[in-house]
Amino acid sequence: MIKAALFDLDGVVFNTEPQYTVFWGSQCREFHPELPGLEHEIKGQTLTQILDKLFSGELEDMRELVVARLDEFEKNMDLEYIPGFETFVKDLKSNGIKTAVVTSSNMKKMEVVLEKHPEMNDYFDRILTSEDFKESKPHPDCYLKGAQVFGCQPAECVGFEDSFNGLRAVRAANEFVVGLATTNSREAINEYSDYVTDDYNGMDFSKLNKIVATSR
């Protein structure tokens, strides 16, 4: 029986990944012109992971500048829900399912998100950010914490993810993995997912429950 639904944020609740690709593309072209297309390789990585990978050594002094640029960029992002998400999450809650955001983003970003979308406080029982976790995805810490805050066993939780690191994190937590093909293709994420979907259209609690039950 499903008791909790745990959602990543970017590419899962909001269709923001294409915008991040634009941002990181501009930074990669400026600081790593020798590596064209690098922005596609870092999709789904946390800010700390990106900074460690791209802005170390001689470029370490550029971290503060890049973070400031990112903060400004995020303030002006278009936060459009993934199709069908609002209807789906409302149906989950009406059926007594606990819901949480489980994101590698920090609280500073979440404050911007909540200012633009205060209704998220009604959609989610808990919002967990990078400050709540000791380890970053693909480590399962964040999804185990999501289960813990609701007093659930991992087997009673469903994790919704789009990135490879996120999908690996849900699987490592031994939770049911729903992969969103918003950032990567269905074919690419299939092996990391128990179920793959393009969006939430047509999805409700009853359908999700049947998907989980027939997959186990």
Image (tube, rainbow, N blue to C red):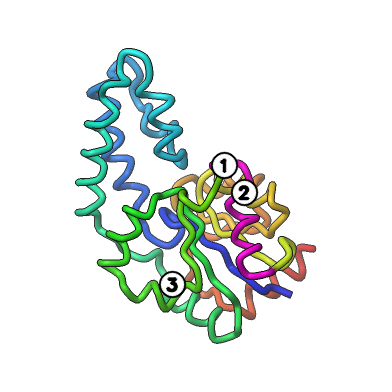
In the displayed structure image, the side of residue 38 where residue 102 appears, left or right: right
Amino acid type at image mark 1: Glu
Q: Secondary structure at mark 1?
A: loop
Mark 3 vs mark 1, foreground winner is 1
Classify 10 Å Cα crowding around label 3: few (below 14), some (14-19), many (20 and above).
some
In the displayed structure image, the side of residue 125 where residue 196 appears, left or right: right
Q: Earlier in the sequence, mark 2 or mark 1?
A: 1
Amino acid type at image mark 2: Asp
Distance from label 2 to label 1 (Cα)? 6 Å
Q: Earlier in the sequence, mark 3 or mark 2?
A: 3
- Residue 204 place in picture, x, y as percent: 56, 78
Image height of 186 relative to 149, above or below? above
In the picture, the disc for residue 85 is: none
Residue depicted at 68% across the width and 75% down the height: 209
Amino acid type at image mark 3: Gly
- Residue 61 place in picture, x, y as percent: 27, 21
Residue depicted at 56% across the width and 63% down the height: 6
- Residue 173 place in picture, x, y as percent: 69, 51
Magenta residues (range): 136-151
Give the labeled residue for mark 1: 135
